[in-house]
Image (cartoon, grey):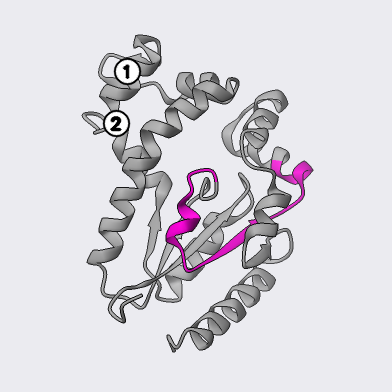
Amino acid sequence: MRPSEPFVLGLTGGIACGKTTVARYLHDLGLPVLDADAVSRSLTAENGEALPAVREAFGEGVFNGEQLDRRALGRIVFSDPEKRRRLEEILHPMVIARMKKATEALEAPIVVWDVPLLYEAGMDAQCGEVWCCYISEAEQISRVMRRDSLPRGEAQARVNSQIPLKEKCERAAHTIHTAGSLAATRRRVRGLLSELRRRNGLE
């Protein structure tokens, strides 16, 4: 890694595992955070770069005129692994390209990549280190049901659509349990960040 290149810290976790809270706190600590979900949404917004390929792959049924019907697309891809892979084949290369370009433009020693599907997309290969947020599966399902107003079956399908959380935790350099207090989560994040900076000469 050239000295001028930012250290890419990958932040991931299971759905509804508190990753957004951790990302927000890292931003509060002064680290630039690139949100892969926001990049993906921009690619599929009106006139987005990915829309022609999505239309070709999934047809007019997932569109309302020129607007992507995200809920309709979600019902399809979260119930059919092959169709989910097709969507990922469209979006992931575009997301990676945009994240890399944005990272190169930042003058910062550390850049956080906030990526729910970091391992699924192979984006861990772009990271110097990965942290994984986790909670129990029962709490995951409960949070998804509340957050997205989904029935239990659809919430379970969304949890099941990702690599098992246990595997993500095993592959990560460090894990962050977010089921406790916000203060405890923040202490854990501060400790990991201090260690990362010290270990990589980024203090």
Number of numbered labels in the structure image: 2
Q: Amino acid at mark 2?
A: Ala
Answer with left or right where residue 147 lies relative to residue 64.
Answer: right
x and y, in percent, of residue 73 in the image: 46, 21
Q: Amino acid at mark 1?
A: Arg
Q: Secondary structure at mark 1?
A: helix
Residue 55 got which mark?
1
Where 129 sits versus 146, above or below? below
Residue 50 got which mark?
2
Q: Which residue is found at the position 66% from the left and 31% from the top? A: 155
Disc 1 or 2, which lies upstream in sequence? 2
Q: Which residue is found at the position 44% from the left and 72% from the top? A: 28
Q: Secondary structure at mark 2?
A: loop
Crowd tier of the residue under label 1, counting other residues whose Cα lies within 10 Å: few below 14, some 14–19, many 20 or above: some
Quadrant in which residue 87 is drawn: top left
Q: Which residues are magenta?
A: 120-140
Q: Nearer the viewer, residue 27 or 175?
A: 175
132 part of magenta stretch: yes
The C terminus appears in which quarter of the rendering?
bottom left
Where 61 sits versus 47, above or below? above
Quadrant in which residue 190 is drawn: bottom right
Q: Which residue is found at the position 52% from the left and 60% from the top? A: 11
